[in-house]
Image: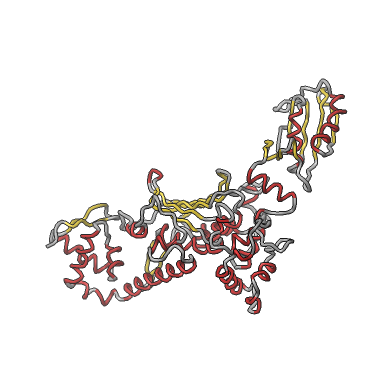
Amino acid sequence: MRQESQNTEYKEQWKDEYLAWVAGFANAKGGTIIIGKSDKGTSVGVPNSKKLLEDLPNKINSHLGIQVAVNLITELEKQLIEIIVAPHPIFPVAYKSRYYQRIGSTNQELKGAALTNFLLLKQGLTFDGVSIPSLSIDKLSLPAIESFKQLALQSGSLTSSEMNLSVSELLDKLLLLDNAQEPKRAAFLLFTNEPQRYVSGSFIQFAFFEAFEIIKFKDELRSDIIQQATSAISLLKAKYLKASVSFNGLQRLERFPIPDEALRESIINAIVHKNYAVPDPIHITVTSNKLTIWNPGELPDGWTISENLLATHPSNRRNPNIANVFTKAGFIESWGRGITRIVESCKLHGNVGVSFHVVNGGFQVSFAFIDIEDEVIADTSREMLASEPSTSRETTNTSREMLASEPSTSRETTNTSRETAALAQNTSRENHGASREATETSKEIHDTSRETILQALSTNENFTAKLIAEQLGITEKGVRYHLDKLKAEGIIKREGSTKKPIWRLLTHK
């Protein structure tokens, strides 16, 4: 007995409200409605089958403006009516000025962003491919355009001579002008400082959660979406993720819990495939052992994670104009391989699991990893970066929260460069300190180092040997030497577990 499916619907008797089901099939991939069957597929028959056979074709054409095949069939000596609806890809089919679509085994009325995208697709358009009334080229950011040109030059998408293209010439080359030579919506997402002024929700929201769903700190990236892609990883690695540290001889090695390639692909996928008709931002949430990236953009109609997404599949670009520019910027290497690259890089990295879900009207990728074990009870590195109140801080640029040094009007590109330079300087200092370890041990036993360590503990009792070494620019070995002596003298005491000790100052002799 054949059951109901995406393409088959059973009704025991005809009701005119079922015209909405006919419209739903027409707006999807077509399908069949059988009158005279129960939901379980049992044939109950239609008493007025001959009259329906005559009336239904005219009724459907009159109300929906389409023609369907209506057949009289017999099953188990019961007369049934079969309505075969062909798909109508060229124009949308409405019933009482409302639009319906067959999705799975249900008939759903299209509203809001779903209706907007549906009507655009019927015209061969996408949400990122239409212009925004009253907005012109002069709203675009020249620094953002120049930044893209540099990326495109590096990737080989632009030649040296094309670097001198005017804004309108570049937009034309990137297919970002419509037939009226007006910039498409994608241009304002790609090349304006605050695209959310023109497209609601076009930013990334970050939050670090402690136990009991308490937000410890949060950030927002509100720059152009190209800059969002480049800044997101820097922000996550500088503030939200802890790296394990090891040494190869004198070389300091940092290993983050999620491989760069997986993080990069996930963020780019979220930006490129986001449903920008939905006014919700991309959400990136982090805990001590999990990171999730959610964007409002479900899978293409008929796709499943196991059968399509995780298998070899053709590229299905929700925002082809944005995707084209990201490709020319060198952010996308090959189409239809992003998910595979995420999975493969996580397998090679080890100790990290990745999963994909369709949840809350969007698509989510989750990374589960082992919380890095180091000698930290209170994560003071995060606390120092998150010194502003977490409940009210929502900034336009990333570096203001991490460095608290630049005015909010500065461009994120400049701030990100400063952050990178600062991080590089810290890393250089740590590497230099590591290389000097053999010669500094004798110097670090002097009273100056001892007093400096005591001063550090007096300001923050949660300092660990590692953090004190980084703060003072000396080696961790030297710090441990002084901590052990101070403990023996009864000036400090050690608390906490063996793996995660903290030091308490008893008195300052």
Q: Is residue 341 left or right of residue 126?
A: left
Residue 417 position within the rendered picture, expressed as x and y whole percent measured from the top left = 46, 70
Left or right of 361, for residue 64: right
Residue under the point 84% across and 26% down? 52
Instruction: In the rendered view, tell whether residue 225 sits above or below residue 362.
Output: below
Figure quadrant of residue 334: bottom right
- The quarter in which the C terminus is drawn is bottom left
Q: Is residue 18 visible?
A: yes
Tell me where residue 193 appears, x and y as whole percent.
54, 63
Residue extending furthest toward the bottom: 161
**How many marks overall?**
0
Q: Is residue 368 above or below residue 44?
A: below
Q: Find residue 201 and report its horizontal and vertical position in percent.
A: 55, 52
Please identify the quadrant where the N terminus is shown. Answer: top right
**Quarter location, residue 102:** top right
Q: Nearer the viewer, residue 277 or 291?
A: 277
Colour pattern of the rendering: secondary structure
Residue furthest front as drawn? 134
Closer to us: 489 or 380: 380
Q: In this orientation, does residue 312 appear?
A: no
Which percent across, then down, holds residue 391? Answer: 39, 49
Q: Residue furthest top?
A: 47
